[in-house]
Amino acid sequence: VLLGAAEAVDLVRRLEGKGVDARAAAIDWPSLMAYKRTFTRDVPAMTEQGFAAKGIASYHGRARFAGPRSIRVGAELLTGRFILLATGAVPRPLGIEGEEHVATSTDFLELDALPARIVLIGGGYIAAELSHLAARAGSRVTILQRGARMLPAFDADAVGWLMERSHDIGIDVRLDTVVEGVRTIAGGYSVHASSKGQPTTVDADLVVHAAGRIPDLDELDLDAGEVRADKGRLVLDDFLRSASNPAVYAAGDAASRGPPLTPIAAYDGKIAAFNIVHGNAKKPDYTGTPSVVFTIPPLATVGLTERQARAAGMDFRVKSAKVPDWYTALRVGEPTYGYKTLVENRTDRLLGATIIGPNAEEVINVLALAIRNGLGAKALEDAIFAYPTSASDIGSML
Ligand SMILES: Cc1cc2nc3c(=O)[nH]c(=O)nc-3n(C[C@H](O)[C@H](O)[C@H](O)COP(=O)(O)OP(=O)(O)OC[C@H]3O[C@@H](n4cnc5c(N)ncnc54)[C@H](O)[C@@H]3O)c2cc1C
Protein backbone atom coordinates (compact mmCIF):
# COMPACT_ATOMS: atom_id res chain seq x y z
CA VAL A 1 0.00 0.00 0.00
CA LEU A 2 2.85 2.40 0.89
CA LEU A 3 4.61 1.56 -2.33
CA GLY A 4 1.42 2.15 -4.32
CA ALA A 5 1.54 5.82 -3.33
CA ALA A 6 5.28 6.04 -4.05
CA GLU A 7 4.70 4.48 -7.48
CA ALA A 8 1.92 6.98 -8.22
CA VAL A 9 4.13 9.93 -7.29
CA ASP A 10 7.08 8.57 -9.24
CA LEU A 11 4.96 7.88 -12.33
CA VAL A 12 3.58 11.41 -12.31
CA ARG A 13 7.07 12.89 -11.92
CA ARG A 14 8.42 10.71 -14.75
CA LEU A 15 5.65 11.89 -17.08
CA GLU A 16 6.25 15.56 -16.30
CA GLY A 17 6.47 17.33 -19.64
CA LYS A 18 5.03 14.23 -21.34
CA GLY A 19 1.41 15.17 -20.89
CA VAL A 20 1.26 15.33 -17.09
CA ASP A 21 1.51 18.32 -14.77
CA ALA A 22 3.51 16.93 -11.81
CA ARG A 23 3.52 20.01 -9.58
CA ALA A 24 1.18 18.60 -6.95
CA ALA A 25 2.72 15.11 -6.75
CA ALA A 26 3.85 14.43 -3.19
CA ILE A 27 3.34 11.83 -0.49
CA ASP A 28 1.25 12.81 2.50
CA TRP A 29 2.77 10.34 4.95
CA PRO A 30 0.22 10.54 7.82
CA SER A 31 -2.74 10.09 5.46
CA LEU A 32 -0.93 7.28 3.62
CA MET A 33 -0.26 5.53 6.95
CA ALA A 34 -3.91 5.88 7.93
CA TYR A 35 -4.90 4.33 4.59
CA LYS A 36 -2.36 1.51 5.06
CA ARG A 37 -3.84 0.69 8.46
CA THR A 38 -7.24 0.09 6.90
CA PHE A 39 -5.59 -2.93 5.22
CA THR A 40 -3.82 -4.31 8.29
CA ARG A 41 -5.90 -3.24 11.31
CA ASP A 42 -8.63 -5.86 11.11
CA VAL A 43 -6.55 -8.79 9.87
CA PRO A 44 -5.65 -10.38 13.24
CA ALA A 45 -9.23 -10.30 14.59
CA MET A 46 -10.71 -11.53 11.29
CA THR A 47 -8.16 -14.33 11.08
CA GLU A 48 -8.98 -15.44 14.58
CA GLN A 49 -12.71 -15.35 13.84
CA GLY A 50 -12.04 -17.54 10.81
CA PHE A 51 -10.12 -19.97 13.02
CA ALA A 52 -12.90 -20.06 15.61
CA ALA A 53 -15.46 -20.82 12.89
CA LYS A 54 -13.40 -23.89 11.97
CA GLY A 55 -13.04 -25.02 15.59
CA ILE A 56 -9.46 -23.81 16.01
CA ALA A 57 -8.68 -22.32 19.44
CA SER A 58 -6.29 -19.33 19.65
CA TYR A 59 -4.07 -18.48 22.62
CA HIS A 60 -2.11 -15.25 23.00
CA GLY A 61 1.39 -15.23 24.44
CA ARG A 62 4.90 -16.45 23.92
CA ALA A 63 4.80 -20.24 23.46
CA ARG A 64 7.59 -22.53 24.65
CA PHE A 65 8.08 -26.28 24.89
CA ALA A 66 7.28 -27.90 28.22
CA GLY A 67 8.01 -31.41 26.90
CA PRO A 68 8.25 -33.29 23.58
CA ARG A 69 4.49 -32.99 22.99
CA SER A 70 3.51 -30.10 25.19
CA ILE A 71 3.62 -26.34 24.95
CA ARG A 72 3.25 -23.72 27.64
CA VAL A 73 1.56 -20.38 26.82
CA GLY A 74 1.25 -18.19 29.87
CA ALA A 75 -0.57 -20.28 32.49
CA GLU A 76 -1.90 -22.80 29.94
CA LEU A 77 -0.29 -26.15 29.23
CA LEU A 78 -1.30 -27.57 25.84
CA THR A 79 -0.58 -31.11 24.72
CA GLY A 80 -0.86 -32.39 21.16
CA ARG A 81 -0.11 -35.46 19.08
CA PHE A 82 1.64 -33.06 16.71
CA ILE A 83 3.13 -29.60 17.06
CA LEU A 84 3.79 -27.26 14.12
CA LEU A 85 6.45 -24.59 14.55
CA ALA A 86 5.56 -21.52 12.48
CA THR A 87 7.28 -18.82 14.51
CA GLY A 88 8.72 -16.91 11.55
CA ALA A 89 11.95 -14.93 11.62
CA VAL A 90 13.40 -11.96 13.48
CA PRO A 91 16.16 -9.47 12.62
CA ARG A 92 19.48 -11.11 13.37
CA PRO A 93 21.35 -9.60 16.32
CA LEU A 94 23.91 -7.04 15.10
CA GLY A 95 26.17 -7.35 18.12
CA ILE A 96 27.10 -3.66 17.99
CA GLU A 97 27.22 -0.93 20.59
CA GLY A 98 23.91 0.95 20.71
CA GLU A 99 21.94 -1.86 19.06
CA GLU A 100 18.91 -0.84 21.15
CA HIS A 101 18.67 2.38 19.08
CA VAL A 102 18.17 0.46 15.85
CA ALA A 103 14.56 0.21 14.64
CA THR A 104 13.20 -2.85 12.82
CA SER A 105 11.49 -2.86 9.44
CA THR A 106 8.23 -3.42 11.34
CA ASP A 107 8.85 -0.16 13.27
CA PHE A 108 9.54 1.61 9.97
CA LEU A 109 6.23 0.40 8.52
CA GLU A 110 4.38 1.93 11.49
CA LEU A 111 6.03 5.39 11.47
CA ASP A 112 3.53 8.20 12.09
CA ALA A 113 5.92 10.77 10.62
CA LEU A 114 8.63 10.23 8.04
CA PRO A 115 12.11 11.13 9.36
CA ALA A 116 14.19 13.53 7.25
CA ARG A 117 17.35 11.38 7.42
CA ILE A 118 17.30 7.58 7.49
CA VAL A 119 20.22 5.15 7.72
CA LEU A 120 19.60 1.54 6.73
CA ILE A 121 22.03 -1.04 8.04
CA GLY A 122 22.42 -3.84 5.49
CA GLY A 123 21.92 -4.10 1.76
CA GLY A 124 19.36 -6.81 1.10
CA TYR A 125 15.84 -6.53 -0.27
CA ILE A 126 14.49 -4.79 2.85
CA ALA A 127 17.05 -1.98 2.47
CA ALA A 128 16.33 -1.73 -1.25
CA GLU A 129 12.57 -1.54 -0.76
CA LEU A 130 12.51 0.82 2.22
CA SER A 131 15.08 3.12 0.61
CA HIS A 132 13.06 3.48 -2.60
CA LEU A 133 9.89 4.17 -0.64
CA ALA A 134 11.49 6.68 1.76
CA ALA A 135 13.41 8.50 -1.00
CA ARG A 136 10.20 8.95 -3.04
CA ALA A 137 8.51 10.29 0.10
CA GLY A 138 11.26 12.89 0.60
CA SER A 139 13.76 11.36 3.09
CA ARG A 140 17.49 11.47 2.65
CA VAL A 141 18.51 7.80 2.74
CA THR A 142 21.91 6.22 3.33
CA ILE A 143 22.49 2.47 3.03
CA LEU A 144 25.50 1.00 4.81
CA GLN A 145 26.26 -2.38 3.29
CA ARG A 146 29.02 -4.67 4.51
CA GLY A 147 29.40 -6.52 1.18
CA ALA A 148 30.91 -5.39 -2.11
CA ARG A 149 27.44 -4.99 -3.61
CA MET A 150 23.79 -4.86 -2.66
CA LEU A 151 21.40 -7.79 -3.15
CA PRO A 152 24.13 -10.43 -3.53
CA ALA A 153 21.58 -13.18 -4.24
CA PHE A 154 20.38 -11.35 -7.37
CA ASP A 155 21.98 -11.03 -10.80
CA ALA A 156 24.92 -8.62 -10.64
CA ASP A 157 24.09 -6.78 -13.89
CA ALA A 158 20.47 -6.19 -12.92
CA VAL A 159 21.53 -5.02 -9.46
CA GLY A 160 23.93 -2.62 -11.19
CA TRP A 161 21.01 -1.13 -13.15
CA LEU A 162 19.02 -0.82 -9.94
CA MET A 163 21.97 0.92 -8.29
CA GLU A 164 22.06 3.51 -11.09
CA ARG A 165 18.37 4.22 -10.50
CA SER A 166 18.85 4.34 -6.71
CA HIS A 167 21.67 6.84 -7.19
CA ASP A 168 19.52 8.99 -9.49
CA ILE A 169 16.80 9.32 -6.85
CA GLY A 170 19.36 10.39 -4.27
CA ILE A 171 19.98 7.20 -2.28
CA ASP A 172 23.53 7.10 -0.92
CA VAL A 173 24.73 3.48 -1.03
CA ARG A 174 28.01 2.86 0.75
CA LEU A 175 29.49 -0.55 0.04
CA ASP A 176 32.22 -2.40 1.98
CA THR A 177 30.98 -0.51 5.02
CA VAL A 178 30.72 -2.26 8.38
CA VAL A 179 28.59 -0.60 11.07
CA GLU A 180 30.31 -0.64 14.45
CA GLY A 181 27.97 1.33 16.70
CA VAL A 182 25.05 3.71 17.04
CA ARG A 183 25.17 6.60 19.50
CA THR A 184 22.53 9.12 20.44
CA ILE A 185 23.32 12.75 19.64
CA ALA A 186 21.21 15.89 19.98
CA GLY A 187 18.13 15.34 17.81
CA GLY A 188 19.05 11.92 16.51
CA TYR A 189 21.70 9.25 16.10
CA SER A 190 25.24 9.00 14.89
CA VAL A 191 26.11 5.76 13.10
CA HIS A 192 29.77 4.79 13.31
CA ALA A 193 31.20 2.54 10.66
CA SER A 194 34.36 1.46 8.98
CA SER A 195 34.17 2.07 5.24
CA LYS A 196 36.86 0.39 3.13
CA GLY A 197 39.01 0.41 6.25
CA GLN A 198 38.43 4.11 7.02
CA PRO A 199 36.30 5.28 9.97
CA THR A 200 33.16 7.15 8.96
CA THR A 201 30.00 8.47 10.63
CA VAL A 202 26.54 9.21 9.30
CA ASP A 203 23.96 11.17 11.30
CA ALA A 204 20.31 10.20 11.08
CA ASP A 205 16.89 10.71 12.63
CA LEU A 206 16.15 6.99 12.28
CA VAL A 207 18.42 3.95 11.98
CA VAL A 208 16.79 0.80 10.60
CA HIS A 209 17.93 -2.83 10.74
CA ALA A 210 17.99 -4.29 7.23
CA ALA A 211 20.81 -6.74 7.83
CA GLY A 212 19.06 -10.06 7.50
CA ARG A 213 16.64 -12.20 9.47
CA ILE A 214 17.01 -15.53 11.25
CA PRO A 215 14.47 -18.15 12.38
CA ASP A 216 12.74 -17.08 15.59
CA LEU A 217 13.62 -20.07 17.78
CA ASP A 218 15.39 -18.57 20.79
CA GLU A 219 12.50 -18.47 23.23
CA LEU A 220 10.97 -21.83 22.30
CA ASP A 221 13.16 -23.84 24.68
CA LEU A 222 13.79 -26.40 21.95
CA ASP A 223 15.77 -28.61 24.35
CA ALA A 224 12.66 -29.15 26.49
CA GLY A 225 10.86 -30.29 23.32
CA GLU A 226 13.76 -32.53 22.27
CA VAL A 227 13.89 -30.56 19.01
CA ARG A 228 17.36 -30.31 17.57
CA ALA A 229 18.71 -27.15 15.94
CA ASP A 230 22.08 -26.53 14.39
CA LYS A 231 23.57 -23.03 14.01
CA GLY A 232 20.18 -21.43 14.65
CA ARG A 233 18.25 -23.61 12.17
CA LEU A 234 15.92 -26.51 12.91
CA VAL A 235 17.23 -29.90 11.81
CA LEU A 236 14.39 -31.30 9.68
CA ASP A 237 13.92 -34.32 7.45
CA ASP A 238 12.69 -34.05 3.84
CA PHE A 239 9.06 -33.91 5.04
CA LEU A 240 9.49 -30.79 7.23
CA ARG A 241 9.53 -32.98 10.35
CA SER A 242 12.01 -32.54 13.17
CA ALA A 243 14.83 -35.07 12.82
CA SER A 244 14.87 -35.57 16.61
CA ASN A 245 11.18 -35.37 17.61
CA PRO A 246 8.67 -37.08 15.25
CA ALA A 247 5.75 -35.12 16.76
CA VAL A 248 7.15 -31.78 15.60
CA TYR A 249 6.90 -30.22 12.12
CA ALA A 250 7.93 -26.77 10.94
CA ALA A 251 6.87 -24.40 8.17
CA GLY A 252 7.80 -21.04 6.68
CA ASP A 253 10.63 -18.83 7.89
CA ALA A 254 11.00 -20.94 11.06
CA ALA A 255 11.68 -24.03 8.94
CA SER A 256 13.98 -22.01 6.63
CA ARG A 257 13.94 -24.79 4.05
CA GLY A 258 12.68 -22.72 1.12
CA PRO A 259 13.17 -19.01 0.48
CA PRO A 260 11.82 -16.77 3.29
CA LEU A 261 8.67 -15.64 1.47
CA THR A 262 4.97 -15.51 2.26
CA PRO A 263 3.88 -17.97 -0.47
CA ILE A 264 6.51 -20.43 0.77
CA ALA A 265 5.15 -20.19 4.33
CA ALA A 266 1.68 -21.06 3.02
CA TYR A 267 3.05 -23.84 0.80
CA ASP A 268 5.10 -25.35 3.66
CA GLY A 269 2.03 -25.17 5.89
CA LYS A 270 0.04 -27.26 3.41
CA ILE A 271 2.88 -29.78 3.01
CA ALA A 272 3.32 -30.13 6.79
CA ALA A 273 -0.44 -30.44 7.34
CA PHE A 274 -0.66 -33.10 4.63
CA ASN A 275 2.20 -35.06 6.16
CA ILE A 276 0.70 -34.81 9.66
CA VAL A 277 -2.71 -36.06 8.47
CA HIS A 278 -1.64 -38.67 5.89
CA GLY A 279 1.76 -39.77 7.15
CA ASN A 280 4.93 -38.50 5.55
CA ALA A 281 4.13 -38.51 1.85
CA LYS A 282 4.98 -35.09 0.41
CA LYS A 283 8.33 -33.33 0.12
CA PRO A 284 8.39 -29.62 -0.59
CA ASP A 285 9.62 -28.64 -4.05
CA TYR A 286 10.63 -24.98 -4.30
CA THR A 287 11.57 -25.11 -7.99
CA GLY A 288 10.60 -21.94 -9.83
CA THR A 289 9.81 -19.76 -6.82
CA PRO A 290 9.92 -16.16 -8.01
CA SER A 291 11.45 -13.49 -5.81
CA VAL A 292 10.75 -9.78 -6.17
CA VAL A 293 12.45 -6.72 -4.76
CA PHE A 294 9.66 -4.15 -4.62
CA THR A 295 11.68 -1.12 -5.63
CA ILE A 296 10.52 1.36 -8.27
CA PRO A 297 10.88 -0.21 -10.75
CA PRO A 298 10.79 -3.73 -9.27
CA LEU A 299 13.56 -6.28 -9.70
CA ALA A 300 12.28 -9.81 -10.17
CA THR A 301 14.06 -13.11 -10.54
CA VAL A 302 13.31 -16.82 -10.82
CA GLY A 303 15.42 -19.94 -11.18
CA LEU A 304 19.19 -19.86 -11.37
CA THR A 305 21.34 -16.77 -11.63
CA GLU A 306 24.13 -16.77 -14.21
CA ARG A 307 26.68 -17.26 -11.44
CA GLN A 308 24.81 -20.26 -9.99
CA ALA A 309 24.41 -21.87 -13.42
CA ARG A 310 28.13 -21.44 -14.16
CA ALA A 311 29.08 -22.80 -10.74
CA ALA A 312 26.90 -25.86 -11.47
CA GLY A 313 28.83 -26.39 -14.72
CA MET A 314 25.71 -26.12 -16.88
CA ASP A 315 25.82 -25.58 -20.63
CA PHE A 316 23.53 -22.66 -21.40
CA ARG A 317 23.10 -19.51 -23.46
CA VAL A 318 22.62 -16.07 -21.93
CA LYS A 319 20.65 -13.23 -23.43
CA SER A 320 20.75 -9.92 -21.62
CA ALA A 321 20.21 -6.27 -22.45
CA LYS A 322 19.18 -2.97 -20.98
CA VAL A 323 16.14 -1.91 -23.02
CA PRO A 324 14.73 1.41 -21.78
CA ASP A 325 13.63 2.16 -25.37
CA TRP A 326 11.10 -0.70 -25.39
CA TYR A 327 7.49 0.38 -25.30
CA THR A 328 6.88 -1.12 -21.80
CA ALA A 329 9.32 1.41 -20.32
CA LEU A 330 8.81 4.35 -22.69
CA ARG A 331 5.05 4.59 -22.17
CA VAL A 332 5.56 5.19 -18.44
CA GLY A 333 8.78 7.23 -18.75
CA GLU A 334 10.78 4.60 -16.84
CA PRO A 335 14.53 4.85 -17.56
CA THR A 336 15.36 1.44 -16.08
CA TYR A 337 14.32 -1.65 -18.01
CA GLY A 338 16.50 -4.68 -18.56
CA TYR A 339 16.52 -8.46 -18.49
CA LYS A 340 18.70 -11.55 -18.47
CA THR A 341 17.58 -15.06 -19.45
CA LEU A 342 19.45 -18.37 -19.25
CA VAL A 343 18.43 -21.25 -21.51
CA GLU A 344 20.00 -24.70 -21.36
CA ASN A 345 21.53 -25.57 -24.76
CA ARG A 346 20.80 -29.29 -24.78
CA THR A 347 17.19 -29.20 -23.55
CA ASP A 348 16.09 -25.65 -24.47
CA ARG A 349 14.77 -25.40 -20.89
CA LEU A 350 14.56 -21.96 -19.29
CA LEU A 351 16.97 -22.15 -16.32
CA GLY A 352 16.62 -18.66 -14.93
CA ALA A 353 15.44 -15.14 -15.63
CA THR A 354 15.84 -11.71 -14.11
CA ILE A 355 13.84 -8.65 -15.12
CA ILE A 356 14.03 -5.11 -13.79
CA GLY A 357 11.43 -2.69 -15.04
CA PRO A 358 7.73 -1.85 -15.12
CA ASN A 359 5.52 -4.86 -14.29
CA ALA A 360 8.51 -7.16 -13.72
CA GLU A 361 6.75 -8.43 -10.59
CA GLU A 362 3.91 -9.75 -12.77
CA VAL A 363 5.86 -10.91 -15.81
CA ILE A 364 8.16 -13.03 -13.63
CA ASN A 365 5.16 -15.23 -12.77
CA VAL A 366 4.89 -16.34 -16.41
CA LEU A 367 8.56 -17.34 -16.37
CA ALA A 368 8.11 -19.01 -12.97
CA LEU A 369 5.35 -21.16 -14.45
CA ALA A 370 7.72 -22.08 -17.30
CA ILE A 371 10.57 -23.03 -14.97
CA ARG A 372 8.39 -24.97 -12.54
CA ASN A 373 6.95 -26.99 -15.42
CA GLY A 374 10.20 -27.41 -17.37
CA LEU A 375 8.92 -25.46 -20.38
CA GLY A 376 11.37 -24.80 -23.18
CA ALA A 377 12.22 -21.39 -24.57
CA LYS A 378 10.44 -22.42 -27.78
CA ALA A 379 7.14 -22.83 -25.92
CA LEU A 380 7.47 -19.31 -24.52
CA GLU A 381 8.41 -17.91 -27.94
CA ASP A 382 5.40 -19.64 -29.50
CA ALA A 383 2.97 -18.39 -26.85
CA ILE A 384 0.61 -15.66 -27.99
CA PHE A 385 0.41 -12.93 -25.37
CA ALA A 386 -1.96 -9.95 -25.37
CA TYR A 387 -0.44 -6.87 -27.00
CA PRO A 388 0.68 -4.37 -25.90
CA THR A 389 1.50 -5.87 -22.48
CA SER A 390 4.79 -6.29 -20.65
CA ALA A 391 4.50 -10.10 -20.94
CA SER A 392 4.52 -9.73 -24.73
CA ASP A 393 8.19 -8.69 -24.35
CA ILE A 394 9.09 -12.22 -23.19
CA GLY A 395 9.57 -13.50 -26.74
CA SER A 396 12.25 -10.84 -27.34
CA MET A 397 14.02 -11.73 -24.09
CA LEU A 398 14.83 -15.30 -25.16
C1 LIG B 1 10.02 -5.86 5.65
C2 LIG B 1 9.64 -7.20 5.09
C3 LIG B 1 9.12 -7.26 3.80
C4 LIG B 1 8.76 -8.48 3.25
N1 LIG B 1 8.25 -8.50 2.00
C5 LIG B 1 7.87 -9.67 1.46
C6 LIG B 1 7.27 -9.70 0.17
O1 LIG B 1 7.12 -8.68 -0.48
N2 LIG B 1 6.87 -10.90 -0.33
C7 LIG B 1 7.02 -12.05 0.38
O2 LIG B 1 6.62 -13.11 -0.10
N3 LIG B 1 7.60 -12.06 1.61
C8 LIG B 1 8.01 -10.89 2.16
N4 LIG B 1 8.58 -10.88 3.41
C9 LIG B 1 8.80 -12.16 4.09
C10 LIG B 1 7.52 -12.65 4.72
O3 LIG B 1 7.00 -11.66 5.57
C11 LIG B 1 7.81 -13.95 5.51
O4 LIG B 1 8.47 -14.88 4.68
C12 LIG B 1 6.52 -14.57 6.01
O5 LIG B 1 5.82 -13.67 6.85
C13 LIG B 1 6.83 -15.86 6.79
O6 LIG B 1 5.64 -16.37 7.31
P1 LIG B 1 5.67 -17.27 8.62
O7 LIG B 1 4.26 -17.69 8.84
O8 LIG B 1 6.72 -18.30 8.51
O9 LIG B 1 6.14 -16.29 9.79
P2 LIG B 1 5.56 -14.88 10.30
O10 LIG B 1 4.66 -14.27 9.29
O11 LIG B 1 6.76 -14.12 10.74
O12 LIG B 1 4.67 -15.28 11.55
C14 LIG B 1 5.24 -15.83 12.71
C15 LIG B 1 4.39 -15.47 13.90
O13 LIG B 1 4.75 -16.26 15.01
C16 LIG B 1 4.81 -15.44 16.16
N5 LIG B 1 5.73 -16.08 17.14
C17 LIG B 1 7.09 -16.18 17.08
N6 LIG B 1 7.55 -16.86 18.13
C18 LIG B 1 6.49 -17.20 18.89
C19 LIG B 1 6.33 -17.92 20.10
N7 LIG B 1 7.36 -18.44 20.75
N8 LIG B 1 5.08 -18.05 20.61
C20 LIG B 1 4.00 -17.55 19.95
N9 LIG B 1 4.09 -16.89 18.78
C21 LIG B 1 5.33 -16.71 18.26
C22 LIG B 1 5.31 -14.12 15.66
O14 LIG B 1 4.97 -13.09 16.55
C23 LIG B 1 4.56 -14.01 14.32
O15 LIG B 1 3.30 -13.43 14.49
C24 LIG B 1 8.94 -9.67 4.00
C25 LIG B 1 9.45 -9.61 5.30
C26 LIG B 1 9.81 -8.40 5.83
C27 LIG B 1 10.39 -8.35 7.22
Image (cartoon, rainbow, N blue to C red):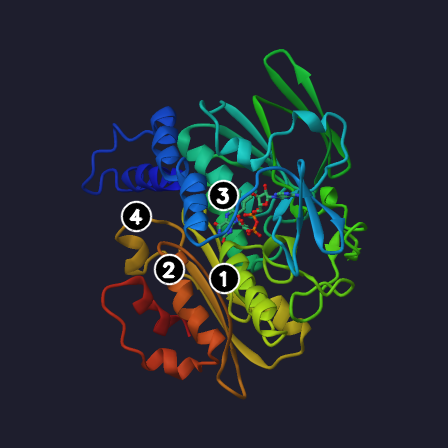
Of mark 3 and mark 4, the one earlier in the sequence is 3
Q: Nearer the viewer, residue 21 or 269?
A: 269
Instruction: Specify whether tag 3 is near ligand 1 (CB below 8 Å).
Output: yes
Counting residues from the start of the chain, the first of labels 3 and 2 encountered is 3
Circle 1 packing at 10 Å, graded few (<14), some (14-19), many (20+), is many
Q: Earlier in the sequence, mark 4 or mark 2?
A: 4
Q: Inspect the image, locate mark 1, and give the three-letter code of the amino acid beneath it.
A: Thr
Distance from the alpha carbon under mark 3 to that under mark 4: 20 Å
From this viewpoint, which residue is outermost toward the top? 186
Q: Which residue is mark 3?
A: 129
Cα gap from disc 1 to disc 2, whole angstroms = 11 Å
Task: Please state, as top left, top right, bottom left or bottom right, where the N terminus lies in the image.
Answer: top left
Q: Are marks 1 and 2 in contact (CB under 8 Å)?
A: no
Q: Please give left or right for residue 338 compared with residue 72 in the image.
A: left
Q: Are marks 4 and 1 in contact (CB under 8 Å)?
A: no
C-alpha distance separating marks 4 and 1: 23 Å
Give the label on residue 333, or none: 4
Question: Tags 1 and 3 in contact by the CB under 8 Å rule?
Answer: no
Asked which quadrant contains residue 19, the reply is top left
Tell me which amino acid carries mark 3. Answer: Glu
Marks 3,2: beta carbons within 8 A: no
Residue at x 56%, y 79% (from the top left corner): 316
- Alpha-carbon span between mark 4 and mark 2: 19 Å
- Tag 3 or tag 1, which sits nearer the N-term? 3
Corner quadrant of residue 206: top right
At mark 4, the secondary structure is loop
Residue nearer the viewer, 41 or 117: 41
20 displayed left or right of 48? left
Q: Which residue shows up at 39% across the image and 37% down it?
A: 42
Looking at the rendered structure, the kind of residue marked 4 is Gly
Instruction: Quickly name the residue at label 2.
Output: 362
According to the picture, the residue beneath numbered tag 1 turns out to be 301
